[in-house]
Amino acid sequence: MEKYFYLVILFPLIGFLVNGLLGSKMKGTTPGLIGTVAVFIPFLIALGVFFNYGHESQPILQNYFPWINIFDFQANFSILIDPLSLQMTLIITGIGSLIHLYSIGYMHDDEGFARFFSYLNLFIFSMLLLVLGSNLLILFIGWEGVGLCSYLLIGFWYKNEDYGYAARKAFVMNRIGDLGLIAGIVLLWSYFKTIEFQAMAIHAANVDMSDPVIIIATLCLFIGAIGKSAQIPLYTWLPDAMAGPTPVSALIHAATMVTAGIYLLVRAHFLFDLAPSVLNLVSYVGIATSIFAAIIALRQNDIKKVLAYSTVSQLGLMFVALGVGAYTTAMFHVTTHAFFKALLFLGAGSVIHALHGEQDIRNMGGLKNEIKSTYWVFLIGTLAICGIFPLSGMFSKDEILTVLFEKSKGLWALSLFSSLLTAVYMFRLLFLTFFGTYRDDEHKKSKIHESPMVMMAPLWVLAILSVFGGILNLPHLIGGESYGKMAHFLDPIFSHSKLATEHMDAGLEIGLMALVVGLVVIIGFVLYNIYVKKESLPKPDMSLRGVEALVANKFGVDELYDTVISKPVLGISRFFGQKVESAFDGISGFFFVAGFKSIGNSLRKIQNGNVEFYLILMTGSIVVLMILQFLIKI
Amino acid sequence: MLIGLILFPLIFSLMIFILPKNLTKYATIFYSVFSLSWMGMVVKNISSWTNPFFTENYVFSSNLPSSLLLVLDGISLIPILLTQLLIALILWMLLANQKEDKSTYSLIALMHFGLNGVFLCADALGFYIFWEVTLIPIYFICAIWGEGKRMPITLKFFLYTFIGSLCMLVSFLYLYQIQPEGGNFSIANIFNVDMSATARFLVALGIFIGLAVKIPIFGFHNWQADTYTSAPFYGSMLLAGIMLKMGLYGMYRWLSPVFAGPLCCDLQWYIIILCIIGVVYGAIIAITQTDLKRILAFSSFSHVGLIAAGIMTFSHSGWQGGLLQMFVHGLNIVGLFYIVNLIEQKYGSRDLNKLGGIATQNKWLAIYGMILVLGTTALPLTNGFPGEFLLLKSMFEYQFLTALFAGTTIIWCAVYMLRLYQKVFFGEESKLVLSGDSSLSSIEHFILIIFVLGVLVLGIFPQLILGLSESTVLNYLTQK
């Protein structure tokens, strides 16, 4: 099975080429089927490899050809199959297949149907390279590749200039992070003379704690992760990225691509373990982002924007977990988050589809009677993300909180706060969308329709995963003998890790769990009272004042970046292009025109037609030349 | 073998004047295919990859201190390959455009003659003569078929490069003059001299100025954007695709040996600083330009600065990355100029504000354009990435903060290139685009596919180019 693993990468690439080159000539849903199959077969292969992969199995390194191979730099085109990459591959191809299937229904009457699937396949290809690459440079191919696909898909409806702007913003902000990543790769090369993960991990065992090069290098890698995983200060592109079709938001901007930063840190954990100061920074950035984004989400009225800020916030929580060295815990949350956030986004897509493009929750309401099936899956997603027992989100979030409680009470309190904010904005979203009465005109109401089977089936699969996903990594307390399956699976990766998590007192664990669930339930009831019983609505944007207006306006960060970065750069560009360039023109003009003219004018006077003068000049010159000759000889 | 690369272009250039007009087309096709196959034969005959691959010496008179000494090694092979490829492509573009002027073809062949000479000649005087020969055809191409204020612009270009070249000539003459009795201009002898640190500095400075104008390096670049904009499309291609490689190649062959001894001041550092100022300066200007050709001019200025900086680190990855990037930059910038030319031909403008929505009208042009833009933005798996990565690597190893400054080019480049792409291909169709002719002929497809394949194949297998120069560069740097 393993020797056919290259097909996992090859199939999406073939799907991309077939749909990209021939797709426009195909009829009906053919491109969609090709695209879906090109992702589903890799999923089956990965599943086969996964079941063969025992606890004693060695990581498999597959080397294809030397990509760059010169005297002082080598990078092979090779992939590494180990528990971590296998788990990511399963998430990418599994959820990827579901979202491809969903897209057949969602995009059915779009004129760019084939183009859409070719981009999606290209994305899966890049994302697989990212997680499977055995060295940092192959990872970087995938890293930039997913950035490109994200750019192409955000700007998918390319006639719209605003979407185009959002797409470019995403690409450019990612590139800022990418520069950090390149710097990190070069530093690590100079230090280890290799960028293969396995070889670096072996060398790293002999490196001192807080080695300055490692600190700078890990900092550089973290900057890359900040860009890709939308953390402060490079998070503003993600909410704008919602301009793309909704399946894209689910696949790229929730379930897979944005977790690449987490993956990078987990993959390079042996370096981060050597740099405790950087790890601290990781948790500070994570917790700040998590709370900041959650607060913004409280005041958003676009169904997709709420989910986007929620993603930023959840990613922040994962970084907090990474920062205290709880790598498997972060990976667990990556997995469950992929389930329920994909579910929520696709559910939102189903709502938007039903309402023919409406995204503002102020124009919704009462939809639970109109689109029952969508309501149920959305409800499951909401309960899962809020952390209601026994849904998957509860287990992964609880694990993060438990670890934090042991490591740092401050971070625990802040993360708890952020989790409670999650419950607030999610219940608000749920109640405003599905409860109460429909708030737009009756004419539109009559047109509301439930989504077709091809969209609902993936939603139900994701709903089931969101409910039972917790089984993957049960706490000891509940799972008994079969606890922590995912942690055991991933364990070989972290065998060198110096920061392993211990088990805590069972009573305390139950107490913490009950506290969180209890608080979330209370919040649910309070919000039900506000939004459903009293039917209070978000105020119109114009009437907001003070802090409320600031939050609704996302703290004005976009405007701030615009004034502090974009506008000055454009100003400098014009200044260079007009003023400085014309100054250069002036200088060269002076030399070539004025200079030559004045030389010409003064030399003209020598040419005076006086033979006597010519003779004197000639003899004089000869004398001077002879003297010079004499001097130079000496 | 090598002499053929110099003789055939010269013969063709003269022959085209004698042949009747209706044969020009066939003669050009024959010539382009012939010169490509000759090049193929030369490469096929390389038996060992230790340098030099070939050396040929043609002595005109034993009294002259100079002879036609031709050397092909890994460093000259790459620009020579690029020249043969691009000249053939440019000739095909002209044929596709139904350009009828015989003299254009003749001048391009003369250019070809000069360029091959520059890249092959290992005799300082011969190198200088070929260097100046290339100036003649490009001057006429820009002055006759250019647009706008072509005369003053071309004159400015001519004066800049000519004065720069003279500085280089002075350095060469000095190097020759201080040799012991019986010296000559051959590369083996000319640098094999003792000099004071001051003299060495002045010699290096002279050669640098000559090269810097051609590349161009920041401070010597004022002629560039105007000339690229006003030149006809094949003139811009010759300038950006091949001529500026003369300057970069000169850094390997004629500038780096001077740095073998001590200099009175840290010229290496100053040159690198100038280069990377150009990298950022050019990129920032490109952000607000509206003329497609001007954007490409400043983009090229920015990219080439990074190549020059990488070469000046005198490190293995800098040199290898530089050679790869020379090839790649030539290919990509010519491809982009061709797309601009097609747009101007079909829609009658190259002003960003008058274009838009071409993707809806001309899907294939948009796809080719996207791939070339991505190549220029150095996306991994396109040809722009491996070279840029190696160059940045050499910079990071040389000085971390300077490299970080230069490295912002990957951000700026994404900004201006995606802006360009958005304004030209995306958005609603503009009036011009709606009224234009949105078809591509099969020869246009053919030429564009060659560029696109170049972007993808070299992106996946950069070793194809890196392997050519590996042993030469290794030898060269270990000897120093």
Image: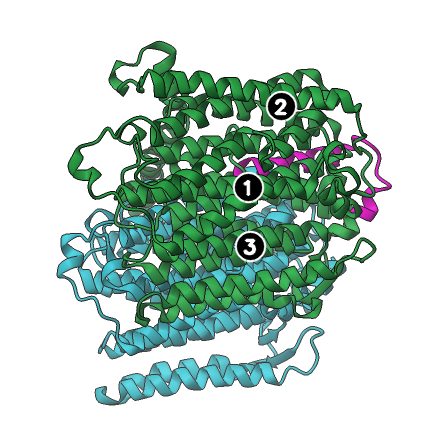
Of the 4 image quadrants, the one containing the C terminus of chain B is bottom right
As measured in the structure, the alpha-carbon distance from the residue carrying label 3 to the one carrying label 1 is: 14 Å
Q: Earlier in the sequence, mark 3 or mark 1?
A: 3
Asked whether the residues under the numbered discs 3 and 1 touch, taking CB atoms below 8 Å apart as contact, a structural biologist would say no
The quadrant in which the N terminus of chain B is found is: bottom right
- Crowd around label 3: few <14 · some 14–19 · many ≥20 (10 Å): some
Q: Which residues are magenta?
A: A201-227
Query: Crowding at label 1, few (<14), some or many (≥20) Cα neighbours within 10 Å?
Result: many
In the picture of the structure, the residue carrying the numbered disc 3 is A94
**Depth check: B435 or A329 in front?**
A329
| Residue B385 coordinates in the image, percent (x, y) | 54, 56
Vertical comparison of A538 with A38: above or below? above
Q: Which residue is mark 2?
A: A284
Q: Secondary structure at mark 1?
A: helix
Chain B: what color?
cyan
Query: Which chain identifier belongs to the green chain?
Result: A
Residue at 69% x, 49% y: name it. Answer: A84
* Dot 2 crowding, Cα within 10 Å, few <14, some 14–19, many 20+: some
Rendered location of residue A128, percent (x, y): 58, 56
User: What is the chain identity of the residue bearing mark 2?
Assistant: A
On what subunit does the disc labeled 1 rest?
A
Type of secondary structure dominating the magenta stretch:
helix
Q: In the image, residue A445 lies at what x, y percent? A: 21, 38
What number is the disc on residue A466? 1
